[in-house]
């Protein structure tokens, strides 16, 4: 997953993690590189758009061509093998990783896309503000002096944006007017359930003031970013009523805002992320995650599984917050950002899919063979076991003795609180990779061994299948 600082410490020097040993390489003695940022910088309120992002280059080797197109496969591979990207590259990389910009787009095309996205976002925001004028401003009770200051910084940003628009050329204003007309036609028929939206705003107004206010990004003038975050979340809830807003979204969206430092870019990147993961914020999604984590834990440690998993899996509920927020509070902040992009590159999940395709091709070959006896379907790698589940299981296994001593929910809560900001990312990644690799190896071995037992032929099918599986 992560490039080693000193290759002399690695067994199989010169091999990457997709070597002949299986889907993941060897781990013994690895030293992992760490990407760190300057957490002491206090930024002003995020601008509405970030035009320079459309033409900014990604300097990762072989990732971006001369016209600005991104090789998505190489980008994801780089993130995984190098343990994330540097803080200087992160904002631009996330715009592609999370789908705000299509990887196939050129720099010239992205200028046009950004203009269109900016206008659409502004029209969307204006629509709910006109319908609910009383919700335009966060309601303050006067006891939070910091939030009162945040409003002042936010208003100053609004004034700066309006002044910049006054100096646009006539051609630029005409272009914006045309894009606004397009957006208005697009969203004209959108209707809101005002009662549900008002309830979502009520919860957002409770959650936003609690969001990461100890981070430099939300200090001093950056306090106004809390109100930028609020506008993004309300706009998302208004135009995604099937999802609306749920607690935890503020923490996720805050992560995008901090890295991208742009209101429009954050909205669209967050929306793309939620297209894939919004189900995790619903009750059925929560239960599905817990089912999968419980099933994986049963594979890895049956005793710990039986201790934690009750009939309704209540004791594993704390894992859902870990998975939902990408372990945001369990690791130091810069490491949590790095982990989020590693998990989001889906590299190991793609390897699992390759293994699954190899099994499918093997089944087709058997179907057309001359053997008459049908072969029963055998269990192999469960591709629903994503890498984040192995990260979660690794943390549980590393704290096995403590967890076995927990006898009630209060003790479990105390245990999870004790981990916040204390876990070592490089060590946890290495151990999670080992768990993933060993699981794939064991499951494939069991599958192929069972396959050989079903055959009457004396031929050595096992080695052929094993070689085929990882070729």
Image (cartoon, helix red, strand yellow):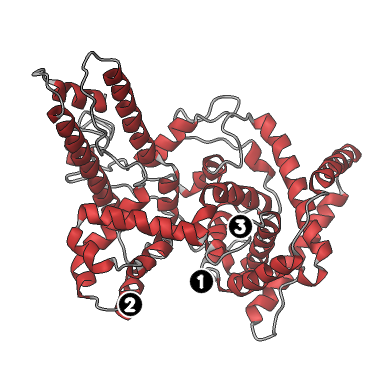
Q: CA distance from mark 2 to mark 1?
A: 28 Å
Q: Which image quarter: residue 2?
A: top left
Q: Which residue is mark 2?
A: 409
Q: Nearer the viewer, mark 1 or mark 3?
A: 3
The residue lying furthest to the left in this view is 458
Q: As drawn, which residue projects farthest toward the bottom? A: 143
Badge 3 element: loop
Q: Does dot 1 land on a helix, a strand or a loop?
A: loop
Q: Residue 74's x, y, as percent?
A: 44, 31
Whether residue 17 appears in this view of the structure is yes
Lower position in the chain sequence, tag 2 or tag 1: 1
Quarter assignment of residue 240? bottom right
Q: Badge 1 is on which residue?
A: 214
Quick check: 171 above or below 420?
A: above
Q: Nearer the viewer, mark 2 or mark 1?
A: 2
Vertical order, 356 against 437 (above or below): above
Q: Earlier in the sequence, mark 3 or mark 2?
A: 3
Q: CA distance from mark 1 to mark 3?
A: 28 Å
* Quadrant (top left, top right, bottom left, bottom right) of the C terminus: top left
**Is disc 2 surrounded by few (<14), some (14 to 19) or many (20+) residues within 10 Å?**
some
242 displayed left or right of 383: right
Q: Nearer the viewer, residue 251 or 390?
A: 390
Which residue is at 28% across, 33% downward? 16
> Disc number at residue 243?
3
């Amino acid at each position: 997953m992560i490039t080693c600082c000193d290759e002399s410490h690695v067994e199989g020097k010169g091999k990457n993690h997709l070597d002949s040993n299986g889907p993941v390489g060897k781990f013994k003695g690895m030293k992992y590189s760490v990407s760190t940022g300057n957490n002491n910088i206090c930024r002003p309120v995020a601008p509405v758009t970030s035009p320079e992002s459309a033409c900014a280059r990604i300097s990762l080797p072989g990732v971006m061509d001369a016209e600005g197109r991104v090789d998505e496969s190489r980008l994801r591979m780089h993130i995984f093998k190098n343990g994330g990207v540097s803080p200087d590259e992160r904002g631009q990389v996330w715009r592609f990783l999370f789908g705000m910009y299509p990887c196939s787009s050129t720099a010239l095309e992205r200028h046009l896309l950004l203009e269109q996205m900016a206008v659409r976002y502004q029209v969307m925001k204006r629509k709910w503000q006109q319908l609910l004028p009383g919700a335009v401003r966060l309601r303050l009770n006067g006891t939070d002096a910091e939030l009162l200051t945040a409003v002042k910084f936010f208003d100053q940003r609004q004034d700066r944006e309006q002044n910049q628009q006054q100096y646009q050329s006539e051609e630029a204003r005409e272009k914006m007017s045309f894009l606004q007309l397009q957006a208005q036609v697009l969203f004209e028929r959108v209707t809101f359930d005002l009662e549900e939206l008002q309830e979502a705003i009520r919860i957002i107004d409770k959650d936003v003031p609690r969001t990461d206010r100890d981070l430099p990004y939300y200090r001093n003038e950056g306090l106004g970013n809390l109100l930028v975050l609020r506008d993004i979340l309300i706009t998302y809830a208004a135009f995604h009523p099937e999802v609306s807003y749920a607690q935890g979204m503020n923490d996720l969206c805050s992560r995008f805002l901090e890295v991208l430092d742009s209101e429009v870019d954050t909205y669209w990147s967050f929306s793309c992320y939620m297209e894939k993961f919004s189900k995790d914020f619903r009750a059925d999604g929560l239960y599905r995650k817990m089912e999968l984590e419980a099933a994986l834990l049963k594979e890895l440690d049956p005793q710990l599984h039986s201790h934690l998993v009750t009939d309704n899996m209540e004791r594993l509920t704390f894992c859902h917050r870990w998975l939902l927020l990408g372990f945001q509070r369990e690791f130091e902040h810069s490491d949590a950002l790095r982990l989020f992009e590693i998990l989001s590159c889906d590299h190991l999940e793609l390897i699992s899919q390759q293994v699954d395709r190899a099994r499918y091709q093997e089944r087709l070959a058997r179907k057309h063979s001359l053997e008459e006896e049908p072969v029963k379907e055998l269990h192999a790698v469960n591709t629903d076991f994503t890498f984040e589940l192995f990260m979660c299981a690794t943390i549980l296994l590393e704290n096995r003795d403590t967890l076995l001593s927990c006898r009630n929910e209060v003790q479990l809560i105390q245990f999870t609180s004790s981990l916040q900001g204390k876990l070592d990312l490089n060590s946890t990644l290495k151990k999670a990779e080992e768990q993933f690799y060993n699981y794939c190896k064991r499951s494939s071995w069991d599958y192929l061994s069972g396959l050989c037992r079903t055959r009457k032929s004396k031929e050595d099918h096992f080695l052929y299948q094993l070689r085929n599986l990882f070729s």
